[in-house]
Image (tube, rainbow, N blue to C red):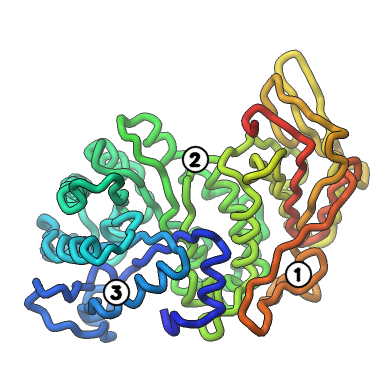
Amino acid sequence: MQDINNNILLNAVKAFSPLKLRLGGTLQDKVIYDVGDSNHPCTQFIKNDSQLFSFSQGCLPMPRWDELNRFFKQAGAVIIFGLNALDGRTIASDGSAVGAWNSTNAASLIRYSVNKGYNIYAWELGNELSGDGVGTRVAAAQYASDVIELHSVVQDIYRGFKSKPQIIAPGGFFDGKWYKELVDKTSGSLDIVTHHIYNLGPGVDSHLVEKILNPSYLDGEMNTFSDLKNILDRSATSATAWVGEAGGAYNSGHNHVTNAFVFSFWYLDQLGMASKYGTKTYCRQTLIGGNYGLLDTTTFVPNPDYYSALLWNQLMGRNVLSTNFTGTKKIRAYGHCAKESEGIVVLLINLDGNTTVNVHLTTETTASKRTWTLNHEHKSPRTRFARIPRGSRQTVGTQSTREEYHLTAKDGDLHSQTMLLNGRILAVNSSGNIPLLEPISVNHVEPIRVAPFSVVFAHIPSIRVPACI
């Protein structure tokens, strides 16, 4: 972070009430904590291509840690801190990191934080050391032993506390065999299993937009979510799945793509897909930094994905509705129970730049199921939408309107960094306040109009299903 006293930054974090912030990344595995137990000088990272991760070892001074925690408290943020998992290991000739994790320095930071009264939601061990790793790797059996060590350290330091921080690992790229071994060997010690997503490839790729607008390409990440869910479901663990880091395109993304309107198609589709497979938290890379930040790196002004994330956070409840869409692949559809209100919220993403889709929600009842259906304009075939369990009810008439939030790009430019909500530009005011995200009201019998290259959230309070009551 640069100027953490910036008012836009503070308001941007506060708007989520609260926002989970993960502090970590590649260099977390090269940082020491200046808490008085290290023989190393407290120096800044220095670029050095001959060293692991192309940087020298760096240090976190405690005054900086104190400063950050003051900001976190003021903003009401929930903190996940990524610990150095390479401490104590050596790098073998084959590039693997061998030996046990040395928890001494990490334990000192944890103890310092407890003594200061800092509220840490979770401690995460390591970054991208799973499977083949990035830069280096740690074997699953050794990683499991290290997770158990971290769990023991946390239990000891937080002894007597009513609630203790969560233990998170491995913060890496999904490798089924490696992850299964880690999960099977850490039952009772590991609370959250994290994986990273950069499924669009390198940021320098000139075909990023084509990939984002390709439904088949988007569907490719479904296997990762499904496979991890299966591992957790079939294990004795009670751990849940998180996406611990996701920037879409690695190496800082691509200017005017990963920080522009078009990226909300990828991002919101990821949020919908991840929820469908039981992911409990999705950490976006980054809040600030690179070309994929939710906030502009220099001004802290929100990029389009910030508003997409904020709308998701305000509207989409934790209960996910089974959603089926058969028809044009260019419409992506997700449904959740509404957050802290009645009814459901439907998310519709139109990847087609030429076709407006009018969506009529109706019900069909058969002996075995009740299904929401979509009817498209241009006499498209009727399309199934949300599969609703038997016994659901629709109280049409109790509320005659629904609320809609239509997101489009300024001047229809997918590369624009300005997003419109219901035709009005979203922008912070002169005081750095985040704008209110206000819907339009539509008669419930009218179709949901999904314009070309647009996103629509529709809150429909008149639709009640058992999962939402």
Secondary structure found at label 1: strand
Image quarter for residue 97? Answer: bottom left
Query: Can you give x and y, in whole percent of width and height, for residue 242 in the image?
Result: 43, 49
Q: Secondary structure at mark 3?
A: helix
Distance between the Cα atoms at labels 3 and 2? 33 Å
Quick one: which residue is furthest to the top in this view?
A: 367
Q: Residues within 10 Å of mark 2 (few under 14, many from 20)?
A: some
Disc 1 and disc 3: Cα gap in Å?
A: 37 Å
Q: Which mark is first along the chain, 2 or 3? A: 3
Q: Kindly identify which residue carries mark 2.
A: 278
- Amino acid type, callout 1: Leu
Cβ–Cβ below 8 Å for labels 3 and 2?
Answer: no
Q: Which numbered disc covers residue 420?
A: 1
Give the amino acid at mark 2: Gly
Residue 248 x %, y %: 52, 63
Quadrant of residue 387 within the rendered picture: top right
Q: Secondary structure at mark 2?
A: loop
144 vs 36: above or below: above
Residue sitting at the far left: 39
Residue positioned 70% across, 39% down in the render: 342
User: Dot 1, crowdedness within 10 Å: few (<14), some or many (≥20)?
Assistant: many
Q: Earlier in the sequence, mark 1 or mark 2?
A: 2
User: For mark 3, what is the residue?
Assistant: 65
- Residue flagged by tag 3: what amino acid is it? Trp
